[in-house]
Image (tube, rainbow, N blue to C red):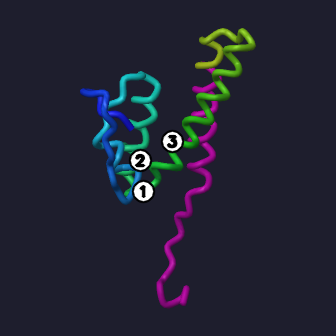
């Protein structure tokens, strides 16, 4: 990893990806977006940086493939929006609302 200010490598040691993402400065807009999503996931849920980055990177990679096949960018964005809505609808259906008594479960 290179420090943005110099040409000499800088070593960061951290227990998880969140520690590293907090310290580095990214120049590429897509990298900033992915890192921001990972940081937001960590702050909201307390974990999930790596999973968020892997999922986001895979989605971006699939989008890149569509763009190389000359799919218009607006169609890709529309597809991502539809996929997001579908995922949110499915997530709402999967919510378990019944509360269990701890002694009953044990």
Residue reaching furthest to the left: 5
Say which mark, if any, is on residue 47: 1
Secondary structure type for disc 2:
helix
Q: CA distance from mark 1 to mark 3?
A: 12 Å
In primary-sequence order, the first of circles 2 and 1 is 2
In primary-sequence order, the first of circles 1 and 3 is 1
Q: Is residue 95 magenta?
A: yes
User: What secondary structure predominates along the stretch shown in magenta?
Assistant: helix
For this rendering, which residue is in front, 104 or 23?
23
Q: Is residue 104 magenta?
A: yes
Q: Which residue is mark 2?
A: 41
Task: Decide: few, some or many residues near mark 3? Use Cα within 10 Å; few <14, some 14-19, many ≥20.
Answer: many
Check the picture and name the quadrant holding the N terminus.
top left
Secondary structure type for disc 3:
helix
Q: Measured from the top left, where is residue 35 in percent x and y?
A: 41, 37
Compared with 78, 105 (above or below) is: below
Q: Which residue is mark 3?
A: 53
For this rendering, which residue is in front, 95 or 72?
72
Residue at the (60%, 11%) spot, across then down: 74
Give left or right: position of 90 versus 44: right
Q: Measured from the top left, where is residue 62 in percent x and y?
A: 67, 28
Give left or right: position of 93 versus 36: right
For this rendering, which residue is in front, 72 or 64?
64
Secondary structure type for disc 1:
loop
Q: CA distance from mark 2 to mark 1?
A: 7 Å
Number of labelled discs? 3
For this rendering, which residue is in front, 72 or 92?
72
Q: Which residues are magenta?
A: 78-106
Q: Quadrant of residue 13?
A: bottom left
Residue at the (36%, 23%) spot, across then down: 27
Q: CA distance from mark 3 to mark 2?
A: 10 Å
**Cβ atoms at labels 2 and 1 below 8 Å apart:** yes
């Amino acid at each position: 990893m290179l420090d943005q200010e110099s040409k000499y490598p800088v070593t960061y040691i951290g227990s998880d990806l969140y520690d590293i993402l907090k310290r580095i400065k990214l120049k590429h807009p897509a990298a900033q977006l992915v890192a921001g999503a990972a940081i937001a996931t960590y702050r909201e849920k307390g974990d999930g940086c790596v999973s968020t980055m892997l999922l986001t990177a895979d989605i971006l990679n699939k989008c890149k493939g569509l763009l190389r096949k000359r799919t218009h960018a607006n169609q890709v964005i529309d597809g991502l929006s539809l996929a997001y809505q579908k995922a949110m609808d499915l997530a709402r259906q999967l919510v378990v609302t019944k509360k269990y008594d701890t002694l009953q479960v044990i």
